[in-house]
Image (cartoon, grey):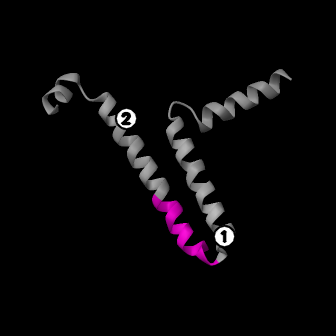
């Protein structure tokens, strides 16, 4: 049982890690796409593009937020 718990902790850390927002954004995009394909299967090509765009947006927002957090405090105060 100890190995199973360690295995699950590994996957949690690997998938979620420090940026849970990325994992939540990807899961939300996949859920939206799955719901829309269930409603209208002909949209599968468009939804492929939607998924690519949604994941790119989630990644971009995550990188921007990380950059904002790591900027020196003086630079942030000058901007505000």
Counting the numbered discs, the total is 2
Residue 32 x %, y %? 59, 58
* Of pointers 1 and 2, the one earlier in the residue sequence: 1
The answer to which of 24 and 19 lies nearer the viewer is 24
Q: Residue at x 51, y 30 (%)?
A: 18
In this view, the residue farthest toward the bottom is: 42
In this view, the residue farthest toward the left is: 78
Is the stretch drawn in magenta largely helix, strand or loop?
helix
Which residue is label 1 attached to? 39
Residue 15 x %, y %? 61, 38
Q: Which structural element holds mark 2?
A: helix
In reply to whether residue 16 is colored magenta, the answer given is no
Q: Vertical placement of 32 versus 39: above or below? A: above
Label 1 or label 2, whichever lies nearer to me, is: 1
Q: Residue at x 58, y 35 (%)?
A: 16
Residue 49 x %, y %? 50, 68
Quadrant (top left, top right, bottom left, bottom right) of the C terminus: top left
In the picture, the disc for residue 66 is 2
Q: Residue at x 53, y 73 (%)?
A: 46
In reply to whether residue 45 is colored magenta, the answer given is yes
Q: Which residues are magenta?
A: 42-53
Q: Residue at x 17, y 28 (%)?
A: 75
Q: Which structural element holds mark 1?
A: helix
The answer to which of 68 and 28 lies nearer the viewer is 28
User: Distance between the Cα atoms at labels 1 and 2?
Assistant: 36 Å
Q: Badge 2, how many Cα within 10 Å: few under 14, some, many 20+?
A: few
Q: Quadrant of residue 13?
A: top right
């Amino acid at each position: 049982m100890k190995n199973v718990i360690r295995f699950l902790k590994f996957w949690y850390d690997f998938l979620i890690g420090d940026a849970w927002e990325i994992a939540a954004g990807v899961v939300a995009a996949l859920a939206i796409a799955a719901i829309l394909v269930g409603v209208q299967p002909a949209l599968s090509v468009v939804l492929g593009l939607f998924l690519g765009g949604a994941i790119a947006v989630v990644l971009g927002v995550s990188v921007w937020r990380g950059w904002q957090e790591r900027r020196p405090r003086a630079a942030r105060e000058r901007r505000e």
